[in-house]
Image (cartoon, rainbow, N blue to C red):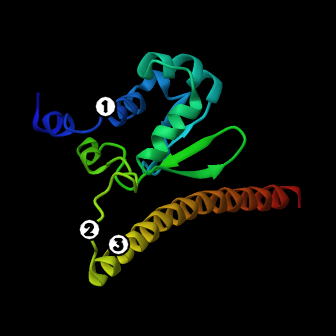
Amino acid sequence: MNASQKHASKANKFLLRLFNILTEPKYSHIISWTDSGTSFAIKQLTEFTVSILPLYFKHKNFSSFVRQLNMYNFHKERDTSDIQIYSHPCFIKGQRDNLINIHRKTSDLYTDTKPVSSLEKKYNSIQSKQKLLNEKISMLEQNYQEVSAYNQTLLCQIYQSREREQKIE
């Protein structure tokens, strides 16, 4: 076992299983990393529910899977009818070691009720805002890449149209 595997072995089993599924090429038509590697996409929900969930998570309940994601603070990025995309700032392609930084949300019922100083509150608030901003930046970067690729395609089509027009003249 190498250092990376030892380090990741402290991560939660749910996260490790999900990470392993995403590294399996045989599932890439069902579930895979997005091009940016900062999120993953479930492309075939029915196939994922029937084939992968029972094999790795011992159930076929997609709602339970999503509940688990929510418990670890994953966020749904896009709401399209056929592809579901989820992300977490520490869940990144090729960075299995980051999994130990992902923790379950704690219920307010079980947390210690020690008074928190106003400085700590401000720090926590700033930290959570920074996290949200980082997530938005990642999403905007991905959108930028998609728009750039689309623009490049449009430019190519324009040049091809001009060439055809010149040949006609």
As helix, strand or loop, the secondary structure at mark 2 comes to loop
Q: For this rendering, which residue is in front, 167 or 36? A: 36
Q: Residue at the spot x=59%, y=57% of the render? A: 146
**Marks 1/3: CA distance?**
27 Å
Q: For this rendering, which residue is in front, 130 or 26? A: 130
Instruction: Find disc 3 in the rendering and name its residue.
Output: 127
Question: Residue 64 at x, y = what percent?
Answer: 53, 32
Q: Quadrant of residue 99?
A: top left
Question: Residue 21 at x, y = what percent?
Answer: 41, 28
Amino acid marked by disc 1: Lys
Figure check: 13 above or below 162: above
Q: Residue at the spot x=44%, y=45% of the render? A: 71
Q: Name the residue at the right extreme.
A: 169
Amino acid marked by disc 3: Gln
- Which mark sits nearer the N-terminus, 1 or 3? 1
Q: Residue at the spot x=42%, y=33% of the render? A: 22
Amino acid marked by disc 2: Lys
Residue 114: which numbered mark, if any?
2
Query: In this rendering, would 97 be left or right of 88?
Result: left
Instruction: Find disc 1 in the rendering and name its residue.
Output: 13
- Which mark sits nearer the N-terminus, 2 or 1? 1
- Which mark sits nearer the N-terminus, 2 or 3? 2
Question: Residue 104 at x, y = what percent?
Answer: 36, 47
As helix, strand or loop, the secondary structure at mark 1 comes to helix
Query: In this rendering, would 69 be left or right of 49?
Result: left
**Marks 2/1: CA distance?**
31 Å
Q: From the image, which quarter does the C terminus lie in?
A: bottom right
**Marks 2/3: CA distance?**
20 Å
